[in-house]
Image (cartoon, rainbow, N blue to C red):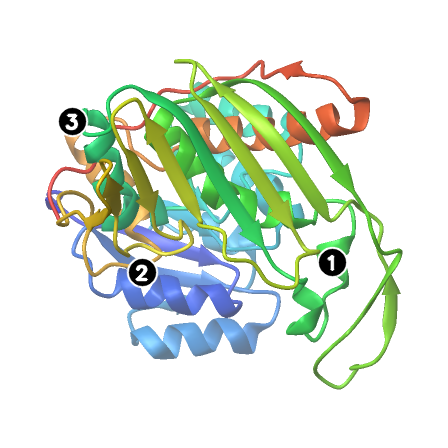
Amino acid sequence: MGEPVKPLNIGIVGAGKISGAYVSTLEKLTSVRLTAVTDLDRARAQAVADQVGSQVAVADSVADLIARDDVDAVLNLTVPAAHAEVALAALAAGKHVYGEKPLATNRKEADAVLTAARDAGLRVGCAPDTVLGTGTQTARKAVDDGLIGRPVAATAFMTTAGHETWHPDPEFYYQPGGGPLLDMGPYYLSALVHLLGPVVKVTGASSRPRAERVIGSGPRAGQSFPVEIDTHITGVLEHADGALSTLVMSFDIKAARLPRIEVHGTEASLSVPDPNNFDGPVEIHRGDGWDVLPVSAGHADTGRGVGLADLAEALDSGRPHRASAELAAHVLDVMLTLMDAAEQGRALPVTSTCERPAPVIGP
């Protein structure tokens, strides 16, 4: 990656488990510098600061962190329900924002964040940035180079028996705002937009096979809890260029041999690695078996936080950043529209759109 003239100073809001993955990446990058952190649990914030070094301050609150002169951008790692609130506060204080997915929990909040950033002339980025790794980007280069001919279809599958099998407190996955689509959909849909462009129409169906689930691990193992949302969602997405993607997101499948993502064209098919990871083999089938393509694009040997570094470098060069709020808002709208279509039993237009992000050239 290129290097800005000076690093972008980053303040972290939210020092939960995911913060460790970000800090490990940010410490290796010259385009960003961690200067402050805050969390409702001060001990967790202090642990992050201690991991990085004495140059990182522990702020008493979100308000204190975003008021600091040594914070240029806020890395928002709070729970999803707080994503929009924290982003809006940071923007009001004149700070750029990069956050964990989803951008917001509903369209109104997402629109408010986009409007606030636009009015203030500030940048907002959003995970996932896994799609900037060598896996999705090598597949995208194959599509862009015409190796599969004209793209006509794609499939995307995320299947599991349910997060209660491993999570000690899984209830939130089965309450409004949770579910397989909102939890894992951003990875798959962001990859599909990178590969095939924005979505213009969706149709779908969903089901809730079980009214209760049982916690499978931890001190509460054996306890049951109610399921408040649909847990198996399938849909067909029509992309602006005409390709059709079939999507299955499920907490109701014990085991499967389904691929993560495949893209099918008039001349060949691509097997794309797990979009929750940065790398993995990309395979092509031209009619005589599967061949592994050499890595040809994307950031290699990286991790969560590379999207924030891309935002920093985009600020320095004046180009659009790739893990953008516009992409995240479109992905959120696609997911919410798919759930509406499933509930109503009919196809619905997706009223938002976004630019297909620029490719990442070179590994």
Kind of element beneath mark 1: helix
Q: For residue 146, which quarter of the picture?
A: top left
Q: Residue at x 54, y 24 (%)?
A: 237
Residue under numbered circle 1:
172
Residue under numbered circle 2:
34
Judged by depth in the image, the label closer to the viewer, 2 or 3, is 3
Q: Is residue 354 left or right of residue 167?
A: left
Q: Indicate the position of residue 73 as horizontal and vertical percent values.
A: 37, 45
The amino acid marked with disc number 2 is Leu
Tell me the crowding category of disc 3: few under 14, some 14 to 19, or many 20 or more residues within 10 angstroms, Cα based: few
Q: Indicate the position of residue 155 as horizontal and vertical percent values.
A: 47, 37
Residue 145, label in figure: 3
Q: Residue at x 20, y 34 (%)?
A: 142
Q: Is residue 130 left or right of residue 165?
A: left
* Of the image marks 2 and 1, the number of the one nearer the N terminus: 2
Q: Are marks 3 and 1 in contact (CB under 8 Å)?
A: no
Q: Indicate the position of residue 5 as horizontal and vertical percent values.
A: 10, 43
* Of the image marks 3 and 1, the number of the one nearer the N terminus: 3
Q: Are marks 2 and 1 in contact (CB under 8 Å)?
A: no
Kind of element beneath mark 2: strand
Q: For residue 210, which quarter of the picture?
A: bottom right
